Image (cartoon, rainbow, N blue to C red):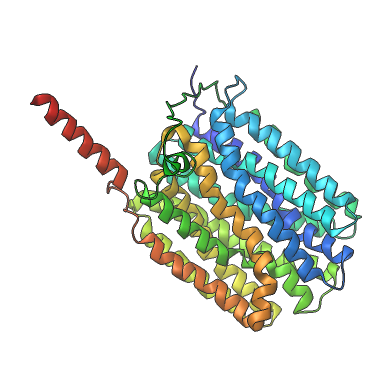
Amino acid sequence: MGTIKTPFTRLAAGISIGFGLMLMGFLTTGALLIPIKVMAIHPEGYAASYGLVAGISAFFALISNPIGGAISDRSTVSFGRRRLWILLGSLLGSLCIMYIYYAKTVLGVVIGWSAAQFFFNFSWAAYTALIPDQVEESKRGTMSGIFGILMPLFLTLGMILIQILNNTTDFVKFATFAAIGIIGPVISLFLIKEGKVEFVKKNNNSTGSFVEKITKIYPSPKKFPEFTWALFSKFLLMLGYCSMFYLTIMLGARMHMDSAQITSTYANIMIFGNIFTVIASLFGGVLSDKVRKQKIFLYISSVILAIGILLYLIPNVNAFYVAAIVCAIGGGCFMAVDTAMVARVLPNKEDTAKDFGIMNVANTLPQSIVPAIGPLLLAIGGWNFFFIFLALMPIIGMLTIMPIPEIGKRLKHERVLETNKLTDMQEVSM
Protein backbone atom coordinates (compact mmCIF):
# COMPACT_ATOMS: atom_id res chain seq x y z
CA MET A 1 0.00 0.00 0.00
CA GLY A 2 2.79 2.43 0.92
CA THR A 3 2.69 5.60 2.96
CA ILE A 4 -0.44 7.72 2.53
CA LYS A 5 0.57 11.36 2.52
CA THR A 6 -1.35 13.62 4.87
CA PRO A 7 -1.93 17.14 3.48
CA PHE A 8 0.63 19.48 5.05
CA THR A 9 -1.87 21.64 6.94
CA ARG A 10 -3.69 18.62 8.32
CA LEU A 11 -0.44 16.89 9.27
CA ALA A 12 0.81 20.02 11.03
CA ALA A 13 -2.47 20.25 12.95
CA GLY A 14 -2.35 16.59 13.92
CA ILE A 15 1.25 16.76 15.13
CA SER A 16 0.65 20.05 16.95
CA ILE A 17 -2.35 18.75 18.88
CA GLY A 18 -1.08 15.24 19.55
CA PHE A 19 2.62 15.79 20.16
CA GLY A 20 1.97 19.10 21.90
CA LEU A 21 -0.52 17.73 24.43
CA MET A 22 1.64 14.66 24.99
CA LEU A 23 4.56 16.94 25.83
CA MET A 24 2.30 19.00 28.06
CA GLY A 25 1.35 15.96 30.13
CA PHE A 26 4.84 14.42 30.07
CA LEU A 27 7.11 17.44 30.59
CA THR A 28 4.97 19.28 33.14
CA THR A 29 4.97 16.12 35.21
CA GLY A 30 8.76 15.90 34.95
CA ALA A 31 9.40 19.58 35.57
CA LEU A 32 7.17 20.07 38.62
CA LEU A 33 5.22 17.08 39.85
CA ILE A 34 8.21 14.69 40.04
CA PRO A 35 10.57 16.97 42.05
CA ILE A 36 7.74 18.05 44.37
CA LYS A 37 6.77 14.39 44.87
CA VAL A 38 10.41 13.62 45.81
CA MET A 39 10.42 16.60 48.19
CA ALA A 40 7.34 15.18 49.95
CA ILE A 41 8.85 11.69 50.25
CA HIS A 42 12.37 12.76 51.26
CA PRO A 43 12.26 16.38 52.58
CA GLU A 44 15.73 16.29 54.15
CA GLY A 45 17.67 15.14 51.09
CA TYR A 46 15.45 15.85 48.12
CA ALA A 47 18.23 17.26 45.90
CA ALA A 48 20.21 14.02 46.03
CA SER A 49 17.07 11.88 45.77
CA TYR A 50 15.87 13.83 42.75
CA GLY A 51 19.29 13.39 41.17
CA LEU A 52 18.91 9.65 41.67
CA VAL A 53 15.48 9.64 40.02
CA ALA A 54 16.73 11.71 37.09
CA GLY A 55 19.94 9.75 36.69
CA ILE A 56 18.34 6.30 36.52
CA SER A 57 15.48 7.44 34.31
CA ALA A 58 18.07 9.01 31.99
CA PHE A 59 19.16 5.52 30.96
CA PHE A 60 15.63 4.71 29.81
CA ALA A 61 15.41 8.01 27.95
CA LEU A 62 18.68 7.06 26.28
CA ILE A 63 17.55 3.68 24.96
CA SER A 64 13.83 4.18 24.40
CA ASN A 65 13.84 6.66 21.52
CA PRO A 66 16.06 4.65 19.14
CA ILE A 67 14.44 1.38 20.21
CA GLY A 68 10.99 2.85 19.68
CA GLY A 69 12.05 4.26 16.33
CA ALA A 70 13.47 0.93 15.16
CA ILE A 71 10.33 -0.94 16.22
CA SER A 72 8.20 1.70 14.52
CA ASP A 73 10.18 1.31 11.27
CA ARG A 74 9.54 -2.42 11.35
CA SER A 75 5.84 -2.37 12.28
CA THR A 76 3.69 -3.46 9.35
CA VAL A 77 0.08 -2.79 10.31
CA SER A 78 -2.73 -1.24 8.30
CA PHE A 79 -3.40 1.13 11.22
CA GLY A 80 -0.04 2.76 10.42
CA ARG A 81 3.39 2.10 11.87
CA ARG A 82 3.76 5.61 13.36
CA ARG A 83 0.13 5.85 14.49
CA LEU A 84 0.37 2.52 16.32
CA TRP A 85 3.23 3.62 18.54
CA ILE A 86 1.87 7.13 19.00
CA LEU A 87 -1.13 5.46 20.62
CA LEU A 88 0.58 2.70 22.62
CA GLY A 89 3.49 4.82 23.84
CA SER A 90 1.35 7.66 25.15
CA LEU A 91 -1.22 5.31 26.73
CA LEU A 92 1.38 3.34 28.68
CA GLY A 93 3.27 6.51 29.60
CA SER A 94 0.13 8.10 31.05
CA LEU A 95 -0.55 5.01 33.14
CA CYS A 96 2.97 5.32 34.52
CA ILE A 97 2.26 8.90 35.63
CA MET A 98 -0.61 7.60 37.75
CA TYR A 99 1.65 4.91 39.17
CA ILE A 100 4.01 7.66 40.37
CA TYR A 101 1.18 9.34 42.27
CA TYR A 102 0.62 6.17 44.31
CA ALA A 103 4.36 5.63 44.94
CA LYS A 104 5.39 5.87 48.60
CA THR A 105 9.16 5.64 48.22
CA VAL A 106 11.89 7.21 46.09
CA LEU A 107 12.38 3.78 44.50
CA GLY A 108 8.73 3.81 43.44
CA VAL A 109 9.21 7.19 41.78
CA VAL A 110 12.35 5.90 40.06
CA ILE A 111 10.46 2.92 38.63
CA GLY A 112 7.44 4.96 37.55
CA TRP A 113 9.37 7.83 35.97
CA SER A 114 11.80 5.49 34.21
CA ALA A 115 8.86 3.60 32.68
CA ALA A 116 7.13 6.85 31.71
CA GLN A 117 10.31 8.08 30.00
CA PHE A 118 10.56 4.77 28.16
CA PHE A 119 7.02 4.69 26.78
CA PHE A 120 6.50 8.38 26.01
CA ASN A 121 9.71 8.34 23.97
CA PHE A 122 8.20 5.63 21.76
CA SER A 123 5.53 8.17 20.80
CA TRP A 124 8.15 10.92 20.50
CA ALA A 125 10.12 8.83 17.98
CA ALA A 126 6.99 8.09 15.95
CA TYR A 127 5.93 11.74 15.77
CA THR A 128 9.35 13.00 14.63
CA ALA A 129 9.59 10.26 12.00
CA LEU A 130 6.54 11.78 10.30
CA ILE A 131 8.72 14.67 9.08
CA PRO A 132 10.99 12.63 6.75
CA ASP A 133 8.07 10.26 6.04
CA GLN A 134 5.54 12.80 4.83
CA VAL A 135 6.98 16.32 4.54
CA GLU A 136 8.71 17.43 1.34
CA GLU A 137 12.15 18.94 1.83
CA SER A 138 11.08 22.48 0.85
CA LYS A 139 8.68 22.58 3.82
CA ARG A 140 10.77 20.80 6.42
CA GLY A 141 12.13 24.02 7.86
CA THR A 142 8.60 25.30 8.37
CA MET A 143 7.50 22.00 9.92
CA SER A 144 10.63 22.01 12.06
CA GLY A 145 9.73 25.52 13.21
CA ILE A 146 6.29 24.23 14.19
CA PHE A 147 7.94 21.31 15.98
CA GLY A 148 10.23 23.74 17.75
CA ILE A 149 7.37 25.78 19.22
CA LEU A 150 5.42 22.79 20.52
CA MET A 151 7.57 22.08 23.57
CA PRO A 152 7.66 25.68 24.87
CA LEU A 153 4.06 26.42 23.86
CA PHE A 154 2.50 23.40 25.52
CA LEU A 155 4.86 23.52 28.48
CA THR A 156 3.62 27.08 28.95
CA LEU A 157 0.03 25.83 28.85
CA GLY A 158 1.05 23.20 31.37
CA MET A 159 2.46 25.90 33.65
CA ILE A 160 -0.77 27.90 33.37
CA LEU A 161 -2.82 24.81 34.17
CA ILE A 162 -0.66 23.86 37.16
CA GLN A 163 -1.21 27.38 38.46
CA ILE A 164 -4.96 26.85 38.21
CA LEU A 165 -4.63 23.49 39.97
CA ASN A 166 -2.19 24.77 42.61
CA ASN A 167 -4.71 24.46 45.46
CA THR A 168 -6.12 21.08 44.39
CA THR A 169 -5.03 17.66 45.60
CA ASP A 170 -2.02 15.85 44.18
CA PHE A 171 -4.35 13.21 42.76
CA VAL A 172 -6.14 15.84 40.64
CA LYS A 173 -2.80 17.19 39.37
CA PHE A 174 -1.38 13.79 38.42
CA ALA A 175 -4.66 12.55 36.91
CA THR A 176 -5.08 15.73 34.86
CA PHE A 177 -1.67 15.53 33.24
CA ALA A 178 -1.91 11.78 32.74
CA ALA A 179 -5.20 12.31 30.90
CA ILE A 180 -3.72 15.10 28.77
CA GLY A 181 -0.81 12.82 27.84
CA ILE A 182 -3.14 10.34 26.11
CA ILE A 183 -6.06 12.51 24.96
CA GLY A 184 -3.89 14.61 22.63
CA PRO A 185 -2.34 11.66 20.77
CA VAL A 186 -5.77 10.03 20.36
CA ILE A 187 -7.14 13.21 18.76
CA SER A 188 -4.14 13.41 16.43
CA LEU A 189 -4.85 9.91 15.09
CA PHE A 190 -8.06 11.22 13.53
CA LEU A 191 -6.05 13.81 11.57
CA ILE A 192 -2.88 11.97 10.56
CA LYS A 193 -3.22 9.57 7.63
CA GLU A 194 -0.85 6.67 7.18
CA GLY A 195 -1.10 3.41 5.24
CA LYS A 196 0.57 0.08 5.77
CA VAL A 197 4.25 0.14 4.87
CA GLU A 198 6.10 -3.11 4.30
CA PHE A 199 9.52 -3.22 5.90
CA VAL A 200 12.12 -4.44 3.43
CA LYS A 201 14.70 -6.40 5.37
CA LYS A 202 18.17 -6.06 3.99
CA ASN A 203 20.31 -9.14 3.43
CA ASN A 204 22.38 -9.26 6.60
CA ASN A 205 25.49 -11.39 6.65
CA SER A 206 25.58 -13.04 10.09
CA THR A 207 29.34 -13.41 9.71
CA GLY A 208 29.85 -9.68 9.39
CA SER A 209 32.32 -7.91 11.65
CA PHE A 210 31.36 -6.44 15.00
CA VAL A 211 31.71 -2.92 13.56
CA GLU A 212 29.33 -3.76 10.70
CA LYS A 213 26.76 -5.04 13.16
CA ILE A 214 27.06 -1.93 15.31
CA THR A 215 26.57 0.35 12.29
CA LYS A 216 23.22 -1.31 11.67
CA ILE A 217 22.19 0.26 14.98
CA TYR A 218 24.17 3.51 14.83
CA PRO A 219 25.15 5.00 11.44
CA SER A 220 28.87 4.72 10.75
CA PRO A 221 30.60 7.97 11.81
CA LYS A 222 33.09 7.38 8.99
CA LYS A 223 30.45 7.10 6.26
CA PHE A 224 27.96 9.56 7.77
CA PRO A 225 30.01 12.02 9.85
CA GLU A 226 27.41 14.78 9.52
CA PHE A 227 24.93 12.70 11.50
CA THR A 228 27.31 12.33 14.44
CA TRP A 229 28.30 16.00 14.39
CA ALA A 230 24.62 16.99 14.40
CA LEU A 231 24.03 14.64 17.33
CA PHE A 232 26.84 16.23 19.34
CA SER A 233 25.72 19.78 18.57
CA LYS A 234 22.14 19.09 19.64
CA PHE A 235 23.24 17.25 22.79
CA LEU A 236 25.62 20.00 23.93
CA LEU A 237 23.14 22.80 23.36
CA MET A 238 20.37 20.90 25.13
CA LEU A 239 22.66 20.33 28.13
CA GLY A 240 22.77 24.09 28.52
CA TYR A 241 19.10 24.66 27.71
CA CYS A 242 18.00 22.05 30.25
CA SER A 243 19.48 24.08 33.08
CA MET A 244 15.86 25.21 33.44
CA PHE A 245 14.91 21.66 34.49
CA TYR A 246 16.88 22.22 37.72
CA LEU A 247 15.11 25.50 38.41
CA THR A 248 12.56 23.79 40.67
CA ILE A 249 15.32 22.49 42.94
CA MET A 250 17.16 25.83 42.81
CA LEU A 251 14.10 27.75 43.98
CA GLY A 252 13.83 25.45 46.97
CA ALA A 253 17.50 25.05 47.90
CA ARG A 254 18.86 28.46 46.85
CA MET A 255 15.85 30.76 47.31
CA HIS A 256 14.32 28.79 50.22
CA MET A 257 10.78 28.61 48.83
CA ASP A 258 8.10 26.11 49.84
CA SER A 259 6.30 23.86 47.31
CA ALA A 260 3.46 26.31 46.64
CA GLN A 261 5.87 29.20 46.05
CA ILE A 262 8.07 27.00 43.86
CA THR A 263 5.10 25.97 41.72
CA SER A 264 3.89 29.55 41.26
CA THR A 265 7.32 31.10 40.61
CA TYR A 266 8.53 28.33 38.29
CA ALA A 267 5.30 28.43 36.31
CA ASN A 268 5.45 32.20 35.84
CA ILE A 269 9.12 32.16 34.78
CA MET A 270 8.46 29.41 32.27
CA ILE A 271 5.37 31.14 30.87
CA PHE A 272 7.30 34.33 30.16
CA GLY A 273 10.27 32.49 28.71
CA ASN A 274 8.28 30.13 26.55
CA ILE A 275 6.37 32.93 24.86
CA PHE A 276 9.70 34.05 23.41
CA THR A 277 10.68 30.48 22.56
CA VAL A 278 7.57 30.14 20.42
CA ILE A 279 8.30 33.38 18.57
CA ALA A 280 12.00 32.60 18.02
CA SER A 281 11.32 29.02 16.93
CA LEU A 282 8.63 29.89 14.41
CA PHE A 283 10.52 32.79 12.85
CA GLY A 284 13.83 30.92 12.90
CA GLY A 285 12.45 27.93 10.99
CA VAL A 286 10.63 29.98 8.34
CA LEU A 287 13.52 32.43 7.88
CA SER A 288 16.06 29.63 7.42
CA ASP A 289 13.90 28.23 4.62
CA LYS A 290 13.77 31.61 2.91
CA VAL A 291 17.49 32.43 3.05
CA ARG A 292 18.51 28.78 2.50
CA LYS A 293 20.97 28.93 5.41
CA GLN A 294 21.02 27.01 8.68
CA LYS A 295 24.42 27.18 10.34
CA ILE A 296 24.51 30.95 10.94
CA PHE A 297 21.22 30.67 12.85
CA LEU A 298 22.67 27.87 14.97
CA TYR A 299 25.83 29.83 15.80
CA ILE A 300 23.93 32.93 16.89
CA SER A 301 21.44 30.88 18.89
CA SER A 302 24.22 29.12 20.78
CA VAL A 303 25.80 32.41 21.88
CA ILE A 304 22.45 33.86 22.96
CA LEU A 305 21.66 30.76 24.99
CA ALA A 306 25.04 30.84 26.76
CA ILE A 307 24.46 34.47 27.77
CA GLY A 308 21.02 33.60 29.10
CA ILE A 309 22.37 30.76 31.25
CA LEU A 310 25.00 33.05 32.78
CA LEU A 311 22.25 35.45 33.86
CA TYR A 312 21.06 32.79 36.30
CA LEU A 313 24.22 33.57 38.30
CA ILE A 314 22.38 36.58 39.72
CA PRO A 315 20.49 35.31 42.81
CA ASN A 316 17.36 37.33 42.18
CA VAL A 317 13.95 36.20 40.93
CA ASN A 318 13.67 39.16 38.53
CA ALA A 319 17.01 38.17 37.01
CA PHE A 320 15.64 34.64 36.55
CA TYR A 321 12.83 36.05 34.41
CA VAL A 322 15.33 37.85 32.16
CA ALA A 323 17.52 34.75 31.98
CA ALA A 324 14.56 32.62 30.97
CA ILE A 325 13.61 35.02 28.17
CA VAL A 326 17.16 35.16 26.75
CA CYS A 327 17.52 31.38 26.96
CA ALA A 328 14.15 31.00 25.28
CA ILE A 329 15.16 33.12 22.29
CA GLY A 330 18.42 31.23 21.77
CA GLY A 331 17.03 27.78 22.44
CA GLY A 332 13.86 28.27 20.41
CA CYS A 333 15.66 29.38 17.27
CA PHE A 334 18.24 26.62 17.59
CA MET A 335 15.72 23.81 18.03
CA ALA A 336 13.65 24.91 15.04
CA VAL A 337 16.55 25.18 12.59
CA ASP A 338 18.40 22.19 14.02
CA THR A 339 15.45 19.87 13.41
CA ALA A 340 15.48 20.82 9.73
CA MET A 341 19.23 20.21 9.57
CA VAL A 342 18.84 16.78 11.19
CA ALA A 343 16.20 15.77 8.64
CA ARG A 344 18.70 16.74 5.92
CA VAL A 345 21.59 14.65 7.26
CA LEU A 346 19.71 11.41 8.03
CA PRO A 347 21.68 8.54 6.41
CA ASN A 348 18.98 6.14 5.18
CA LYS A 349 15.33 6.58 4.24
CA GLU A 350 14.61 3.01 5.36
CA ASP A 351 15.69 3.79 8.93
CA THR A 352 14.28 7.28 9.39
CA ALA A 353 12.46 6.65 12.68
CA LYS A 354 15.35 4.66 14.12
CA ASP A 355 17.89 7.35 13.19
CA PHE A 356 15.60 10.17 14.28
CA GLY A 357 15.13 8.20 17.49
CA ILE A 358 18.89 8.20 18.05
CA MET A 359 18.95 11.93 17.35
CA ASN A 360 16.07 12.51 19.76
CA VAL A 361 18.20 11.07 22.53
CA ALA A 362 20.10 14.36 22.33
CA ASN A 363 16.82 16.13 23.10
CA THR A 364 15.55 13.93 25.89
CA LEU A 365 18.68 12.75 27.67
CA PRO A 366 19.89 16.19 28.87
CA GLN A 367 16.52 16.68 30.59
CA SER A 368 17.55 13.86 32.92
CA ILE A 369 21.33 14.36 32.90
CA VAL A 370 21.23 17.95 34.19
CA PRO A 371 19.24 17.06 37.33
CA ALA A 372 21.40 13.95 37.76
CA ILE A 373 24.74 15.81 37.66
CA GLY A 374 23.37 18.85 39.48
CA PRO A 375 24.43 17.68 42.97
CA LEU A 376 27.95 16.94 41.68
CA LEU A 377 28.34 20.34 40.02
CA LEU A 378 27.06 22.07 43.15
CA ALA A 379 29.46 20.09 45.32
CA ILE A 380 32.39 21.16 43.14
CA GLY A 381 31.71 24.90 43.01
CA GLY A 382 28.21 25.88 44.09
CA TRP A 383 25.63 27.60 41.93
CA ASN A 384 28.21 29.73 40.08
CA PHE A 385 30.07 26.65 38.84
CA PHE A 386 26.76 24.94 37.99
CA PHE A 387 25.67 27.68 35.58
CA ILE A 388 29.13 28.49 34.16
CA PHE A 389 29.64 24.82 33.33
CA LEU A 390 26.28 24.56 31.57
CA ALA A 391 26.83 27.87 29.73
CA LEU A 392 29.99 26.44 28.18
CA MET A 393 28.09 23.54 26.60
CA PRO A 394 26.41 25.46 23.72
CA ILE A 395 29.68 27.33 23.06
CA ILE A 396 31.51 24.01 22.67
CA GLY A 397 28.58 22.82 20.57
CA MET A 398 29.32 25.52 18.00
CA LEU A 399 32.55 23.69 17.15
CA THR A 400 30.57 20.56 16.27
CA ILE A 401 28.34 22.47 13.86
CA MET A 402 31.28 23.64 11.73
CA PRO A 403 31.99 20.31 9.93
CA ILE A 404 28.35 19.96 8.77
CA PRO A 405 27.85 21.14 5.16
CA GLU A 406 25.44 24.03 4.64
CA ILE A 407 22.24 23.70 2.60
CA GLY A 408 23.08 23.13 -1.07
CA LYS A 409 26.38 21.40 -0.38
CA ARG A 410 26.51 17.64 -0.71
CA LEU A 411 26.99 15.41 2.29
CA LYS A 412 29.93 13.03 2.43
CA HIS A 413 27.89 9.88 1.78
CA GLU A 414 26.20 11.54 -1.20
CA ARG A 415 29.61 12.34 -2.68
CA VAL A 416 30.74 8.75 -2.11
CA LEU A 417 27.63 7.40 -3.82
CA GLU A 418 28.17 9.73 -6.76
CA THR A 419 31.83 8.64 -7.04
CA ASN A 420 30.85 4.97 -6.94
CA LYS A 421 28.20 5.54 -9.58
CA LEU A 422 30.70 7.22 -11.92
CA THR A 423 33.17 4.39 -11.34
CA ASP A 424 30.54 1.78 -12.21
CA MET A 425 29.61 3.67 -15.38
CA GLN A 426 33.24 3.83 -16.45
CA GLU A 427 33.70 0.12 -15.88
CA VAL A 428 30.60 -0.66 -17.94
CA SER A 429 31.76 1.55 -20.79
CA MET A 430 35.10 -0.27 -20.87
Residue 35 place in picture, x, y as percent: 78, 62
Which corner quadrant of the image does residue 192 belong to? top right
Side (left or right) of 295 relative to 23: left
Q: Residue furthest front?
A: 207
Residue 52 place in picture, x, y as percent: 74, 63
Residue 309 place in picture, x, y as percent: 57, 73
Q: How many marks?
A: 0
Residue appearing at x 31%, y 43% in the figure: 413
| Residue 183 visible in the picture | no
Which corner quadrant of the image does residue 343 belong to? top left
Residue appearing at x 47%, y 54% in the figure: 231
Side (left or right) of 430 relative to 26: left
Q: Where the C terminus falls, by quadrant? A: top left
In this rendering, the answer to whether 270 lies above or below 224 is: below
Q: Residue furthest left?
A: 430
| Residue 268 visible in the picture | yes
Side (left or right) of 329 relative to 273: left
Residue appearing at x 64%, y 29% in the figure: 84
Residue 21 place in picture, x, y as percent: 69, 44
Side (left or right) of 100 relative to 384: right
In this rendering, the answer to whether 352 lies above or below 237 is: above
Which corner quadrant of the image does residue 185 belong to? top right
